[in-house]
Amino acid sequence: MTSQRRLARERVLQALYAYDISRSAPDFLSNDIFKDLEEGASMEFARKLFRDTLENLGSLDAILQGHLEHWDMNRVNPIDRSLLRMGVAEILYSEEIPTKVTINEIIELAKRYSTEESPKFVNGILDASLKELANDGKIQKTGRGLINTSTKKKQ
């Protein structure tokens, strides 16, 4: 399952990047880019993550912008921008996926698809965003062990 979910994340990254650059119709992009995913859980995961990211771009960018010192989201490398948006969307809207898994997967994608500095940059921004979201009580995960003590809202 992990390999299928990673492939789904790769396709979501590609679709988000294509959307960011071209502003093509999301359905057109997802239908074309997701065509090699297996029908079922991985396809459903990819479509949901892509939709959740696009539907919440403004709020995702606002969260991320708060952690970009002296940078504007529009100046961030487009691949990194897509990874960051996708990472925060998965943290917020994929209740069944542990936050550590999300961050690790996004870092792996940064290593594969972006610059040498990107994994460290993406990790720092996602970690800071996660801490903010956890402190604000905005992370809702279901199931045993999905939120560790470092991500619970501090009393």
Image: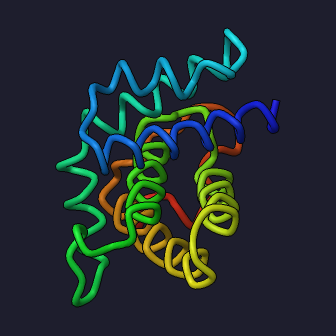
Vertical order, 8 against 45 (above or below): below
Left or right side of 129 for 35: right
Number of numbered discs = 0
Left or right side of 55 for 97: right
Camera-side residue of 129 and 24: 24
Camera-side residue of 40 and 111: 111
Residue 36: image location, x then y, percent? 68, 21
> Can residue 124 be seen?
yes
Residue 35: image location, x then y, percent? 61, 18
Identify which residue is drawn at 68% across, 21% down.
Answer: 37
Which corner quadrant holds the C terminus? bottom left
Q: Quadrant of residue 74?
A: bottom left
Left or right side of 120 for 132: left
Identify which residue is drawn at 30% across, 66% down.
Answer: 64
Residue 81: image location, x then y, percent? 38, 62
Left or right side of 69 for 47: right
